[in-house]
Image (spheres, rainbow, N blue to C red):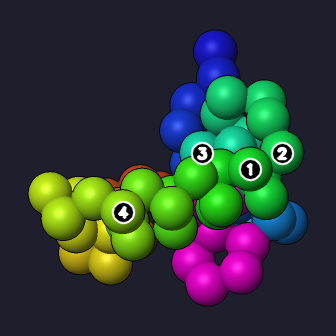
Amino acid sequence: MNRLRRSNDNKMIAGVLGGVAEYFNIDATIVRLAFVLISIFSAAFPGIIVYIIAMFIIPTEY
């Protein structure tokens, strides 16, 4: 079973988006780009706050 975890291998800051990319089996660059674009163009999506919360909620890989 594939579980959502922060990535140790594919991380830039805390590995949250790298872990999401590994979970969905897509390129991490696409996930990072989509996250930034959604954060910039949507006033209802507080990207930095969501990322910080995910940093504490999502466990790291073993």
Residue 45 is at least partly visible in this image: yes
> For mark 2, what is the residue?
27
In front of the other: label 1 or label 4?
Answer: 4
Cα–Cα gap, marks 3 and 2: 10 Å
Cα–Cα gap, marks 4 and 2: 22 Å
Mark 2 is surrounded, within 10 Å at the Cα level, by few (under 14), some (14 to 19) or many (20 or more) other residues, namely few
Q: Quadrant of residue 14?
A: bottom right
Q: Which mark is residue 30?
A: 1
SS at circle 3? helix
Region of the chain picked out in magenta, as a range: 11-18
Q: Earlier in the sequence, mark 1 or mark 3?
A: 3
Q: Identity of the amino acid at label 4?
A: Phe
The span from disc 1 to disc 3 (Cα, nearest Å) is 11 Å
Amino acid type at circle 3 is Val
Tell me the amino acid under the disc marked 1.
Ile
Q: Residues within 10 Å of mark 3 (few under 14, many from 20)?
A: many
Rendering coords of residue 57 (x, y %): 31, 59
Please name which of the two marks, 3 or 2, marks the residue nearer to the observer.
Answer: 2
Tag 2 near tag 1, CB within 8 Å: yes
Residue 48 lies in the magenta stretch: no
Do the residues bearing badges 4 and 2 touch, measured as CB atoms within 8 Å? no
Q: Which residue is mark 4?
A: 41
Quadrant containing the N terminus is top right
Give the residue number, with chain letter if any, for mark 3: 20
- Quadrant in the picture for residue 21: top right
Q: Mark 2: which secondary structure?
A: loop
